[in-house]
Image (tube, rainbow, N blue to C red):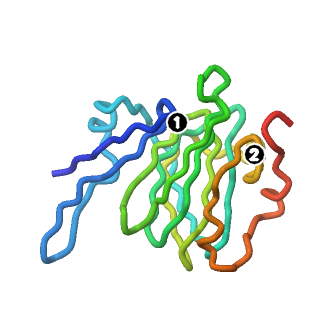
């Protein structure tokens, strides 16, 4: 009874996933992961860790990645709305240095599959947002790296106007992330 619509982006491997919703007067049901459906769409991932985070409006987390232990991620929003961004850092990719962003929300139920070799981050647009994401490799804090959210070479169009005058909130670590090539 599951099903998914897989929507490729202009960056190879980066895929929007729309779960098929089955609803009636009681509510709805949807699958968020089904190994055979994803494999049929060319997405191979053996997830080993599930993460969940909650953040207030204006929080920007990222753009994060792991150097030696890269992670593929399947990202979705359980509550609220975020602008989700992935940046291709694969050195042999023709789209290396390109980014892709989209709105993920509890209302649109979209997911984003982010392959290994990408930096990932998001900006919370609603009063509060909860994200859940599956990873195909464990987190290694000593291996963590990142790219500045405001790197001028990336020129990511973060929808800051959606913050309605509220300031951007970054961790101290994220404030000090370098631009690409630094």
- Taking the image as shown, residue 107 lies to the left or right of residue 121, namely left
- Residue at 78 percent across and 64 percent down: it is 171
- Residue at 22 percent across and 68 percent down: it is 28
In which quadrant of the rendered view does residue 24 lie? bottom left
Q: Can residue 158 be seen by looking at this rendering?
A: yes
The disc at residue 147 is 2
Q: Secondary structure at mark 1?
A: loop
- Dot 2 surroundings within 10 Å: few (below 14), some, or many (20 or more)? many
- Taking the image as shown, residue 35 lies to the left or right of residue 111, namely left
Q: Nearest the camera: 135 or 80?
A: 80
Q: Is residue 94 above or below residue 39?
A: above
Give the residue furthest to the left: 25
Q: Nearest the camera: 93 or 36?
A: 93
Q: Indicate the position of residue 141 as horizontal and vertical percent values.
A: 73, 48
Instruction: Specify the quadrant that holds the C terminus.
Output: top right
Q: Which residue is mark 1?
A: 115
Q: Can residue 69 be seen by looking at this rendering?
A: no
Q: Secondary structure at mark 2?
A: loop
- Dot 1 surroundings within 10 Å: few (below 14), some, or many (20 or more)? many
Q: Is residue 30 above or below residue 15?
A: below
């Amino acid at each position: 009874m599951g099903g998914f619509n897989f929507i490729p982006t202009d960056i190879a491997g980066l895929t929007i996933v729309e779960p098929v919703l089955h609803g009636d007067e009681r509510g709805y049901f949807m699958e968020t992961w089904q190994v055979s459906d994803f494999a049929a769409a060319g997405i191979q991932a053996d997830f080993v860790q599930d993460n969940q985070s909650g953040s207030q409006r204006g929080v920007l987390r990222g753009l994060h990645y792991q150097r030696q232990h890269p992670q593929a991620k399947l990202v979705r929003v359980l509550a609220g709305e975020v602008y989700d961004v992935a940046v291709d850092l694969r050195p042999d990719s023709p789209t290396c240095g390109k980014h892709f962003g989209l709105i993920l929300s509890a209302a649109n139920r979209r997911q984003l599959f982010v392959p290994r070799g990408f930096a990932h981050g998001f900006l919370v647009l609603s009063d509060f947002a909860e994200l859940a994401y599956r990873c195909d490799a464990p987190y290694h804090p000593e291996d963590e790296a990142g790219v500045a959210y405001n790197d001028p070479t990336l020129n990511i169009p973060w929808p800051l106007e959606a913050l309605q005058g509220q300031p951007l909130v970054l961790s101290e670590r994220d404030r000090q992330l370098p631009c690409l090539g630094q």
